[in-house]
Image (tube, grey):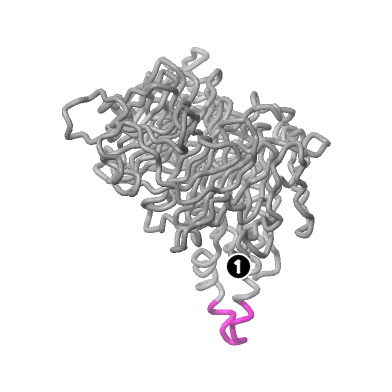
Amino acid sequence: MGPLSTRLLMQRGRPKSDRLGKIRSLDLSGLKLRSEHLDPSLLGRLRQLQELDLSNNQLDTLPANLGLSHLRILRCANNQLGDVTFLCQFPQLEELSLEGNPFLTVSDNLKVSFLLPKLRKVNGKEASATFSQVENLNRELTSRVTAHWEKFMAALGPKEKAEKVQADFVRSAVRDVRYGPESLSEFTQWRVRMISEELVASGGTQVPKADNLERPVEAAATRESRARLMALKRPHDVPLNLFPNKRVCTSPSAQVEGGPMGSDGSQAGLRLEPLHFLQCHSKNNNPQDLQTQLWACAFEPAGEEGHSEDTSQTVATCGGEAVCVIDCQTGIVLHKYKVPGEEFFSVAWTAVTVVTQAGHKKRWSVLAAAGLRGLVRLLHVRAGFCCGTIRAHKKAIATLCFSPTRETHLFTASYDKRIILWDIGIPNHDYEFQASQLLMLDTTSVPLRLCPVVSCPDAYLLAGCEGGCCCWDVRLDQPQKRRVCEVEFTFSEGSEASGRRVDGLAFVNEDVVASKGSGLGTICLWSWSQTWAGRGSQATVAVVVLAWLQWSPTELAYFSLSTCPGEGIVLCGDEEGNVWIYNVQHLLNQKTPLPAAPQAPTQILKWPQPWALGQTVTKTMVNTVVANPTFTYLTALTDSNIVAIWKRQ
C-alpha cells in the first residue's frame, strides 16, 4: 500500500460524501499501512472525523500533527506501535483499542490514562481502574519529587542556585526518584521528568498538583462503589486462640505475628505487616463477590535488564475466570486477563528470548495459566495479551510448572490422570507459540502438585497425587515417549503406608523435600538422596524422614504448601485463615537425631480480619501462600476472593 489518496478516503469514509470535511467515520484497517503513509496534510482535512480504524496495519507510530481534534474513537489494534505519546493530540478521545501491539507495555497503558483524561474504554474494558492507579502513582511521585527538590536545594550554596538548578535538578530527579515495580519504571521516570520540569519552571514556588487528573463521571462512580479492604491489625501481644474442638494441643512456643522467638527458643520470628488486601478476581467485577475461590500464585523471576531474581515483587494470582498480575509494593493490579466460563487453577512463569521483525532480541516474561477447560494460555504479560493456546488435555488441568533448566519446557498435570511435557517453543514473527508434545506420563490417580527434582531436574519429576507421591523418569534421550510411574514413595509403615493423598510438595533445598497430606496434622521433611539411594529395584519405597512439622489437624484437603529455599522456610495456610511459617534451617543443620515428635511452627501468622462490604471478614481458608525469594513479600490466596499481601519488616 502506498500513500493515502483523497479517493481512498472517500471510498472508505462514512457517511458517503464528495467532501472530506463531512466524513465522520473512516476505516483504514488491513491496508498494510506504514507510518510514513499517513499524510497529515490529507488527514487534517477530515475536520469532523470522530471514528478512525487503523487496525491490522504496520504502523510503529502516528504522526504528531494529524489535526483530528474531534476524534472520539481510535482503533490501532495489531500494529507495531512502540510508544503512545502521540495520543496527546486527541484530547476528546473516549474509546481506544491497542490490542496486539507486542512492544507496548504496562507503562504505556498508564501513559494512555494520563494523556487522555476523557477516555472511557481501553481495549473494550472500562478505564476507571487504570485512572485510579495513575492517580495514586502521580500523588506519590509528586510527593517524592518535591522532597527531592527540597533536599537538592538545601545542598546548594547561594551562588550556585541560579545557574545549577535547571541544568542539574531534572537529571538528578530522574536518576534518583524511584517508586513502584521495575515494569513501571518507564512510566514513573517519564512522569518524574514532567513533574521536575514543572517544578523548575515555577522556581519551586508552585508544587505540581498531584490530583489534577480529570476523569469521566463514570470512572468516579465506579471507583466510589468499589469495596475497599482495610486490614485490622492484631496487636502483637494477643495470644493464639486455639479452639479445642478444631485443633490438637499446640506448643505454647509457637509464636504469632511478630513473635520474638521460634519453636526451639533460638529462631527469631519474622516481622510481617499486612500491606494490601485485594478483591481483583471478582466475577463480572462485582464488589459484593466474596465467594470466588483463589487457587495459585507465583512470583515473576525478575532476571531481566540486569536485575537480580531476588528483587522480584510482581506476583501472578489465579482464581475464578481471571488471572491477575500484581505489584506487591503498591498493590496495583498491573494486568488482568479474563476468560468468561473458565476457572483458573494454576499459573507458572518462564522467560524466553524472541527476535522481533526488525531483528532485535528481546527477553519476554511469559505466564502460563490453565484450569477447568484443559487449555494452557501463554500470556505476554508486559504487552498484556495472550500469544498462544495449547489444547493440552480433555479434562481440567490441576497444576503446571516450567522446567528450571529448560525455559520452553512445560509440564501439565490433569484430571485425566496424565502428565504431559510440552516444548512451547519460541514465538514466531507473529508473536505466536507453536507447542509440541515431548512426553506423556501416566498416573494411577489425579496429579495435584508437580516438582522437578532439584539436583537432577532433567532426569526425574515428582508428583503429589490423590493416591500418593510418585516419581517418573523424564530423560528425553530415552526411547519411550509414554511412561508409567517408576517409584511410589510411602511415608509410614504398615497397611496404610500407600494410597494417601499428597496435596503439598516442594523442595526446601537441593535434597530435602517437604510434603503434606501423608499424615493428618503434619508436614513431612524427607531426604531425596537418601531415599533414592535405598531404592534398589523396588517399585514402592519408604522415604527417609528427617523431621515432622506440626500443622493444623483439619481433615480438609488441597491447602498447598510452598518453600523459600534461600531462607530455609516452609509455608502453609489453613482452614481458619492462618499462615504457618517454619524456619527449618536449624533442623537441617542439626547433626544429633531429631525428636520423633512433630516440631512446632516458628510462628503462625494470624488472619488480619480485613474489612469488606461493611463487615469484618473474620474467617477464611488460605488455599495457598507463597513468598518471593528473599522473603520480602508474602502473598496468600483465600477461598473468599481476597488476595492478602504482607511485607517483611
Q: Secondary structure at mark 1?
A: helix
Q: Amino acid at mark 1?
A: Val
**Which one is nearer the viewer's eye here, 563 or 28?**
563
Question: Residue 109 placed where, x, y %?
Answer: 52, 40
Query: What residue is at 33 percent from the left and 33 percent from the top?
Result: 487
Of all residues, the one furthest to the front in this rendering is 494
Query: Quick check: is 355 in the magenta stretch?
Result: no
Vertical placement of 328 versus 623: above or below?
below
Question: Residue 119 placed where, x, y %?
Answer: 61, 34
Question: Residue 408 placed where, x, y %?
Answer: 30, 37
Of all residues, the one furthest to the top in this rendering is 16
Of all residues, the one furthest to the right in this rendering is 614
**Which one is nearer the viewer's eye here, 234 or 331?**
234
Query: What residue is at 37 percent from the left and 58 percent from the top?
Result: 306
Determine if residue 558 is in view.
Answer: yes
Q: Split into 4 quadrants, where in the image is the N terminus? A: top left
16 sits to left or right of 365: right
Q: Split into 4 quadrants, where in the image is the C terminus? A: bottom right
Q: Which image quadrant is residue 397 in?
A: top left
Magenta extent:
153-164
| Residue at mark 1 | 200
